[in-house]
Amino acid sequence: MAEPVTGTLRRALRLIAEGQPEASAAMASWLQGLTVSVDVASEPAVVIGGVGREVVEVPSPGRAAIRIATDRASIRALLSGGRTLSQSLRSGAVGLAGKTEDLSRGLRAFEYFVGALLRIDEAEELRLELESGE
């Protein structure tokens, strides 16, 4: 059975903190004071936020400032290039909610997240696990 997507997210954040500390600090800065709930169907949700120079799991505040809801198949479609993020949002395959200002800050953090993972060799293993996992 495949690792939960939220578990892979935790591993990715650790890799970034260790391998790309400046990107980790930038992500944390953009998310300072915000909480982001990542809810992947049939998995326990995870809530993250910027703490110090890292993005870490934080206690749920009840309703997170940014809320992302999707399923494993939609994540796999994004990773494989089968769908763009814009297509996934428009079709409802990826749900995204929050105030515009918070979403804008979250997008900046996400850009650092993707950029950092592209610079870490071990991150390729995470992508392959997500693409191949059922």
Image: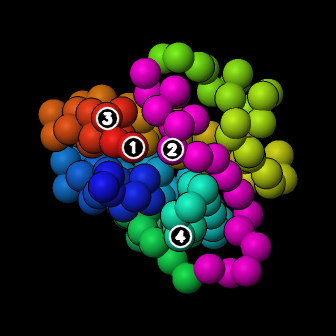
- Badge 4 or badge 2: first in the primary sequence: 4
Image height of 89 relative to 63, above or below: above
Whether the magenta-drawn stretch holds residue 75 is answered as yes
**Type of amino acid under label 2:** Arg
Whether the magenta-drawn stretch holds residue 49 is answered as no
Looking at the image, which residue is at 42% across and 68% down? 56
**Type of amino acid under label 3:** Ser
Looking at the image, which residue is at 73% across and 63% down? 65
Disc 3 target residue:
132
Query: How are the residues colored?
Result: rainbow
Q: Dividing the picture into quarters, in which one does residue 90 lie?
A: top right
- Badge 2 or badge 1: first in the primary sequence: 2
Residue 15 shows in this picture: yes
Point out which mark residue 72 bears. Answer: 2
The image quadrant where one finds the N terminus is bottom left
**Callout 2: helix, strand or loop?**
helix
Q: Magenta residues?
A: 60-80
**Callout 4: helix, strand or loop?**
loop
- Badge 2 or badge 3: first in the primary sequence: 2
The image quadrant where one finds the C terminus is top left
Residue 51 shows in this picture: no
Query: Left or right of 130: which side holds 69?
Result: right
Q: Are marks 2 and 1 in contact (CB under 8 Å)?
A: yes
Query: Left or right of 16: which side holds 111?
Result: right
Residue farthest right in this picture: 99
**Callout 1: helix, strand or loop?**
loop
Q: Dividing the picture into quarters, in which one does residue 128 lie?
A: top left
